[in-house]
């Protein structure tokens, strides 16, 4: 697979401000659903999804849970300092571990009003946790890398409970509004369970228990992956050479049982969201890495898939290599990271279909959709604009089937 030249202007489109969904619909599954298959488009609602899926398919969900990653402190002068959690630094860089920490933790952050936060100054606030007052402090330990240490007075409380009690829902910046009480529930999938994301896997926001009941009646199986979505998902491409864009690294967690389900799947595999695609394709490339004897670290660099190769393993060969590795290491779960960059020219190995929302122009997510659909991505987005679809995180949905031309032989 060769790295093609990409002209970013080919992946721009005009998105009017009034097409951005600022609030969710009252009912999750009443969003519109654009269905693309074999070059043809039809318009449905999300509650029609079970009718559009074949029996015995496999759906792969990202079960990450959004944390209240925006923390607000006030200086004694009254100045407001906003701290947005990005990546954990210590005592662990592993998100599930730092969430359970009961002693000071350090994160890389984004800081609003940072110029007014003096070096060495301790910001502090009080929170009510289970009827008991707890003090939380923030110290800027490295201004250049925006590293902040958080301390709290009651070390029987894990960090995840501290931010649940004190943080705000990290709504995307393009919504241009403050979070409301309803966002705590609606900016979260109904199947979220593993805390660590600072942005929601928004394709899953449309699902309801009623939808799951209908899907299961068709013997459609489910597999979970955990990819903790980072704020880098919103980062626009600002470089002339697209492949120079600094892709964000995100942590992934696969249970062995999920990998076995994917390996044994005979029917269609559908990813729920671009984060699930990134996880699945990264899992494939980890298998390739093992087969090529390029290390046992589950860490996929952004352009690893585009390296020249004499042959490409099948999905089954790659996944079996992963399972053999896990069995040799007596592992029931696989944890790693990925900065995989999927853009036009990529061939997909792990799925046939995708459920996704409509993304911002000129972003890595639009490039991913264009990698799937070729020039038809423009037709899909134009159809959505012309038919009053709502865009971005709280917007409407689509079910896209990948043409055979960009599917690698499984």
Image (spheres, rainbow, N blue to C red):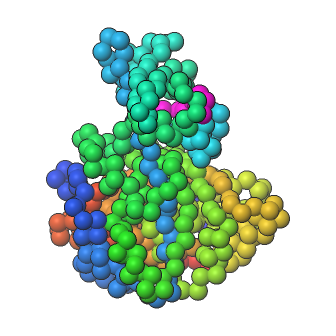
- Image quadrant holding the N terminus, namely bottom right
What residue is drawn where x is 26% and y is 39%? Answer: 178
- Image quadrant holding the C terminus, namely bottom right
What residue is drawn where x is 27% and y is 50%? Answer: 182
Q: Is residue 165 visible?
A: yes
The stretch in magenta equals 102-109
Q: Eyeballing the image, is 251 above or below 352? A: above
Q: Residue furthest right?
A: 328
Quick check: 347 left or right of 315?
Answer: left
Residue 299 position in % (x across, y down)? 66, 53
Q: Eyeballing the image, is 211 above or below 396? A: below
Residue 89 position in % (x across, y down)? 60, 34
Quick check: 129 left or right of 250?
Answer: left
- Residues 308 and 22: in front is 22
Quick check: 330 left or right of 73?
Answer: right
Residue 277 position in % (x across, y down)? 51, 65
Residue 191 position in % (x across, y down)? 45, 63
């Amino acid at each position: 697979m060769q790295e093609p030249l990409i002209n970013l202007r080919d992946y721009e489109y005009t998105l009017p401000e009034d097409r951005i969904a600022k609030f969710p619909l009252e009912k999750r599954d009443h969003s519109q659903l654009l269905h693309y298959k074999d070059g043809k488009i039809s318009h449905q609602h999300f509650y029609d999804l079970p009718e559009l899926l074949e029996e015995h398919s496999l759906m792969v969900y990202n079960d990450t849970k959004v944390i209240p990653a925006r923390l607000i402190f006030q200086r004694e002068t009254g100045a407001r300092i906003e701290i947005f959690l990005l990546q954990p630094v210590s005592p662990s860089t592993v998100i599930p571990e730092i969430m359970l920490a009961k002693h000071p933790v350090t994160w890389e952050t984004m800081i609003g009003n940072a110029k007014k936060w003096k070096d060495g100054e301790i910001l502090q606030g009080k929170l009510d946790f289970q009827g008991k007052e707890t003090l939380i402090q923030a110290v800027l330990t490295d201004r250049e890398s925006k590293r902040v240490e958080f301390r709290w007075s009651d070390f029987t409380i894990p960090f995840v409970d501290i931010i649940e009690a004190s943080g705000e829902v990290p709504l995307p910046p393009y919504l241009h509004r403050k979070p409301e009480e309803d966002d705590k529930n609606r900016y979260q999938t109904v199947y979220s369970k593993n805390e660590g994301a600072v942005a929601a896997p928004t394709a899953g926001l449309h699902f309801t228990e009623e939808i799951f009941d209908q899907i299961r009646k068709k013997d459609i199986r489910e597999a979970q992956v955990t990819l903790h979505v980072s704020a880098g998902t919103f980062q626009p491409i600002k470089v002339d050479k697209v492949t120079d864009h600094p892709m964000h690294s995100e942590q992934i967690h696969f249970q062995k049982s999920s990998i076995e389900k994917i390996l044994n799947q005979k029917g269609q595999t559908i990813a729920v969201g671009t984060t699930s695609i990134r996880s699945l394709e990264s899992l494939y490339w980890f298998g390739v890495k093992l087969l090529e004897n390029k290390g046992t670290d589950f860490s996929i660099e952004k352009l690893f898939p585009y390296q020249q190769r004499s042959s490409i393993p099948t999905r089954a060969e790659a996944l079996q290599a992963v399972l053999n590795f896990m069995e040799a290491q007596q592992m029931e779960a696989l944890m790693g990271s990925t900065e995989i960059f999927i853009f036009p020219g990529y061939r997909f190995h792990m799925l046939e279909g995708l459920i996704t929302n409509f993304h911002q122009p000129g972003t890595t997510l639009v490039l991913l959709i264009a990698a799937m659909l070729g020039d038809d991505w423009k037709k899909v987005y134009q159809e959505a604009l012309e038919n009053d679809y709502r865009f971005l995180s709280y917007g409407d949905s689509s079910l896209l089937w990948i043409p055979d031309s960009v599917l690698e032989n499984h």
